[in-house]
Image (cartoon, rainbow, N blue to C red):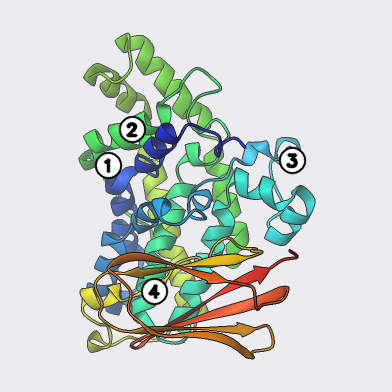
Amino acid sequence: MKKMIFSALLVCLVLILSSWGSKGHKKISGNAPQGYPPAMQFLKPSWTNFVTNHASDADYRKDQDPDESPRHYIDIDNYPEFLQTGTIHQNYDSVVARYGLWFVVDQGTLPWATLRCYDSLKSCFSRGDWNRSALFAADLGHYVGDGHMPLHITVNYNGQITGNTGVHSRYETYMISRYESMIQYEVDSARFIQNVSDYIFDYLYLNYQYVDSILYADSSATAASGSVGTELYYQNLWSKAQHFTTWFMKTGSEALSSLIYTAWVEAGSPRMYPNSIDDPEDLDQPYVSAIYPNPATDHIIIPLVNSGSREAFSIRIYDAYGRLVDEIENHYAQEGVSKIRYDLGKLGDGIYICHFRSGNYTGSGRFVVSAR
């Protein structure tokens, strides 16, 4: 498959340099709170600072979670219906039924990852879990930022089809690192989004229209400077791209602000008091990342992310009817990511819930056991 057969070295390079770089994502997430209404100002500074400082966590997970990378892009112009109508079906299950799971995953799952992250954020707000809500808001900011970078929305993501090979990192990482301080903008007030799915897909369709603008800026800068990668090249690239690049980041911040505001309103507009959010280091308590492979046949990997907590953890497996079928009790995770292998020999085909507990934190993930 296209991205899976790419050389390992180049894949690593693209992943490291992907997604606006850390400076771009931090700017998009860091400016989003400008749009919060007065009723949400209680989120500052602890919650909003955490969301900003962890804006690139999703990128860092790519080398630990094989399911993470597809969440950062969608090669939308590989969908025949998009080429014909300019849109695709929004329902994930419908798209999978039409094109097959492997095709959908290979083209990237950015809009659906954004939707799932939004739903998780809303759930955290609903139950007053401010610590976990900060983690999901940080990831939401990352996926929204990716959706406002046109080269994350096209099969020609690195200019390899048009003779602009390498433009991805030249534009979103090296250019941004040079001119990030010059990207200044004000964020409009957050608005309530009536249909979140429509909203996410609409900004993807809009931002896709700028793919050719980036490629033209790259070609023009190359012609004017005689080569790529020189300071003269980046000066020319910035000259061509600065206006729409600033617009991408501005609209990205506004989209994130509105999505967080909408999730908060839909959750019932709960209030948080200053002493109800833990210290920033307490937000880094152990949690379970995405279970893989999923669906699975003989085993699953449960990635446990631990930033140094000494809390014991337990994992319980429930079937679709809520019956406990297995448990792993009182283990301690090493610092970093522990990949816990769980053999599925005793489980029949069906849907299962993996419930995780460590200290005051609880979480869960769904996985499917398919026919062997």
Circle number at residue 287? 4
Q: Do the residues labelled 2 and 1 touch (CB within 8 Å)?
A: yes
Mark 1: secondary structure: loop
* Amino acid at dot 3: Thr
User: Residues under labels 4 and 1: Cα distance?
Assistant: 35 Å
Q: Quadrant of residue 111?
A: bottom right
Q: Which is in the foreground here, disc 4 or disc 3?
A: 4
Residue 218: x and y, percent? 40, 22
User: Dot 3: few (<14), some (14–19), or many (≥20) neighbours within 10 Å?
Assistant: few
* Amino acid at dot 2: Gln
Identify residue for label 3. Answer: 85
Q: Quadrant of residue 303?
A: bottom left
Q: Vertically, is 175 above or below 280?
A: above
* Amino acid at dot 4: Tyr
Identify residue for label 1. Answer: 183
In terms of sequence position, does the residue under pointer 2 or pointer 4 come before the other? 2
Circle number at residue 354? none
In terms of sequence position, does the residue under pointer 4 or pointer 1 come before the other? 1
